[in-house]
Amino acid sequence: MKIVDELYNLYKNKLTGDEEDIDMLAFAFLEEMSREDLLHIIQELNEQELYDLMGLYLIESLKGKFASEDYRKPNSPIFTHRNVH
């Protein structure tokens, strides 16, 4: 993605690249962007970049949803026990 390359080149010598720096950079970037700016960036994506973007969004959103709902509670078995007799 072009914007990732641009941000990386701008900040590669200024940040350590740890998760905290990357989060800060991403949120600062998004804070400065309007909806129209973001839509313009999305329109410039090729098909693979768009699939990657949506895939990452879906994965992270689902992880958050399952984590917030405490999906695998200790008293809730994954499989329902059935009496086959």
Image (cartoon, grey):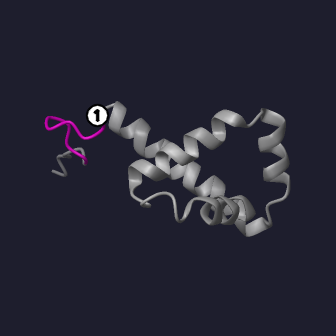
Residue toward you, 76 or 66? 66
Does the magenta segment cover residue 41?
Answer: no
| Residue 73: quarter of image | top left
Q: Helix, strand, or loop for circle 1?
A: loop
> How crowded is the residue under tag 1: few (<14 C-alpha within 10 Å), some, or many (20+)?
few
**Residue at the image point whose x is 48% and y is 46% from the top:** 23
Farthest residue toward the front? 14
Q: Residue at coordinates 42% horizontally, 60% vertically from top-left?
A: 16
- Asked if 32 appears above or below 53 in the picture, the reply is above
Closer-to-camera residue (21/70) = 21
- Position above or below: 16 against 39: below
The quadrant of the rendering that contains the N terminus is bottom right
14 sits left or right of 72 in the view: right
Answer left or right for 64 relative to 81: right
| Residue 72 in the image, given as x and y percentages of width and height | 25, 41
25 versus 44 height, above or below: above
- Residue 19, how many percent across, how many down? 40, 53
Residue 75: in magenta span: yes
Relative to 22, 5 lies left or right = right
Residue underneath mark 1 = 70
The region drawn magenta spans 71-78
Q: Main secondary structure of the magenta part?
A: loop
Q: Position of residue 30 (x, y in %)?
A: 65, 39
Residue farthest to the top? 69
Residue ID at (77%, 33%)? 34
Q: Is residue 15 left or right of residue 76?
A: right
Q: Amino acid at mark 1?
A: Asp
Residue 43, position as x, y percentages in the image: 85, 53
